[in-house]
Amino acid sequence: MPGATIQATDACDAAALRDLIADAKAKQAMSESRALKPVLFSVPKAKPVPSNEDREREIARIDKERIDGKKSAAWSAFIGERGTRYAECSLENFAVGVESQRKAIETLTAYRSSIAERIREGEGLILFGPKGTGKDHLLCGLVRSVISAEKSIQWANGLDLFGDIRDGMTNGDTERSLIDKLTTPDVLYLSDPLPITGPLSPHQANVIFRILDKRYANRRPTWVSVNVTGGAELEERIGPQNADRLRDGAIAIHCNWNSNRKAKQ
């Protein structure tokens, strides 16, 4: 019946409309609920403000790490040039068997105890005597103290020094610039600046004089280990002027005991 069909359709439309209205109201209620729901924010805790003492301690720690790093690098650079044989050398592990050795250790220990002042005053060291007596062991035993005092030190082997200057000039450096590298460090440590036999050549003696004279004029100490029997032989082989500048105000230690170098049994 046509009329019945129309009524049924009207009823379906009315039901659908009610569903749409109900769905719209539900969505509106949910939206309003979300809008009214409080939003919670996580507020980070404020970091404590360090005190002046804390800041000073941190600065001191950073400075110490920086200085310790520089000292370690300086020691590594020294051993890189001097050789790993000398890495463990100290005054404490030098074998003492005779009175002259004990006195040498006593003198060098006193020097070490005020090393910054002695460097400032230009007080050098001359360790002389027969070969193999540990002169370089003793001087290497003082190098750590130079570095700990935040002073610079340069080591040079005598004959290598002259070869380095010759090679440097071949590569375009001037003799003056190469000599200046040895006159500016706080301490210059020369290991046996003499040839195996005989005196220095006139040119070698002149190079040594230019180095020693500039250091002497600026109160920069020079340490030297040298295989001579005494002052007369030192003058004869290195030259009177050079010996005079090395000796003035320096501590001279005669290492006149037996050689420590022995073959394995």
Image (tube, grey):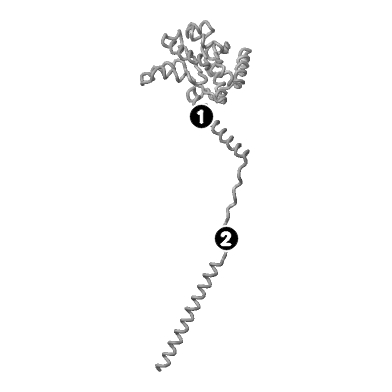
Q: Amino acid at mark 2?
A: Leu
Which quadrant of the rendered structure holds the N terminus? bottom left
Number of other residues with Cα within 10 Å of mark 1, as a class: few under 14, some 14 to 19, many 20 or more: few
Tell which circle, 1 or 2, labels the residue nearer the N-terminal end. Answer: 2
Q: Can you tell which mark lies on residue 40? A: 2
- Tag 2 secondary structure: loop
Task: Work out whether residue 262 can be spotted.
Answer: no
**Disc 1 to disc 2, how far (Cα)?**
55 Å
Q: Quadrant of residue 199?
A: top left
Task: Work out whether residue 218 can be spotted.
Answer: yes
Depicted 227 relative to depicted 172: above or below: above
- Mark 1 or 2: in front is 2
Q: Position of residue 104 (x, y in %)?
A: 60, 15
Q: Amino acid at mark 1?
A: Ala
Q: Quadrant of residue 164?
A: top left
- Name the residue carrying label 1: 73
Q: Position of residue 77 (x, y in %)?
A: 49, 26
* Residue found at x 57% / y 13%: 251
Depth check: give the residue in front, 176 or 31. Answer: 31
Q: Position of residue 161 (x, y in %)?
A: 44, 17
Q: Position of residue 2 (x, y in %)?
A: 39, 93
- Tag 1 secondary structure: helix
Residue projecting furthest to the bottom: 1
- Along the horizontal axis of the image, is 209 left or right of 46? left
Depicted 61 relative to depicted 112: above or below: below
Which quadrant of the rendered structure holds the C terminus? top right
Depth check: give the residue in front, 111 or 79. Answer: 111
Cβ–Cβ below 8 Å for labels 1 and 2? no
